[in-house]
Structure formats: C-alpha cells, structure tokens
C-alpha cells in the first residue's frame, strides 16, 4: 500500500474528509511525498494502516494517522 493508494481509497469511501486536503497539508507544511505507510495492529485482531511522516513538519509535528484496513476510516488512538 502506498500513501497515494491509501489517500484514494479513503477519499473513495469518505469523500467529504478533509484529512488529505491540500490546503490543510500546506498549513502544516506537509506534502504527500513526506508520507509512508506500514501495517499496524491495534490490540485483539484490529488491523490498520499507519500513515507516518518520514520527517517532522512545522513545529516538529511527526504524529502518525491510522486507517482501518477494511473500511479505510480514520482511527483515533489515545497515545
């Protein structure tokens, strides 16, 4: 799974999502080329894709975003 594939699948299922909005990404100093994807397991049998930044962006932000592998819905974790 590439970051672009994840973006396309997420927007296909959630067309009103603003997560990948160009304006939002520009505000934080981010771009799609700064993202990578890896598989991630949350507890008992819940698997998701972790969208992580290769390098920190504005104000040192480097938090990952998580998306359910089956529904491509964004998952919010309490870290």
Image (cartoon, helix red, strand yellow):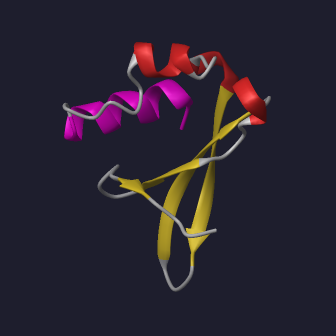
43 in relation to 75, above or below: below
- Which residue shows up at 64% across the image and 68% down it? 79
**Magenta stretch: dominant SS?**
helix
- Which residue shows up at 49% across the image and 59% down it? 48
- Which residue shows up at 53% across the image and 52% down it? 49
Work out whether residue 10 can be spotted.
yes
**Residue 30's spot in the image, x, y percent?**
62, 20
**Residue 31's spot in the image, x, y percent?**
59, 16
Pick the quarter of the image with the N terminus.
Answer: top right
**Residue 46's spot in the image, x, y percent?**
47, 74
User: Looking at the image, which residue sits at the far bottom?
Assistant: 44
**Residue 45's spot in the image, x, y percent?**
49, 80
- On screen, residue 18 versus residue 20, left or right, reads left
Q: Is residue 3 magenta?
A: yes
Residue 45 or residue 29, whichever sits in front: 29
- Which residue shows up at 35% across the image and 27% down it? 8
Q: Which residues are magenta?
A: 1-14
Work out whether residue 57 can be spotted.
no
78 in relation to 9, above or below: below
């Amino acid at each position: 799974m590439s970051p672009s594939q994840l973006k396309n699948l997420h927007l296909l299922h959630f067309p009103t999502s603003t997560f990948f909005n160009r304006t939002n990404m520009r505000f934080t100093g981010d771009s799609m080329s700064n993202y990578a994807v890896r598989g991630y397991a949350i507890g008992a049998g819940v698997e998701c894709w972790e969208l992580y930044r290769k390098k920190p962006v504005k104000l040192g932000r480097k938090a990952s975003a998580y998306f359910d592998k089956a529904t491509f819905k964004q998952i919010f974790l309490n870290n």
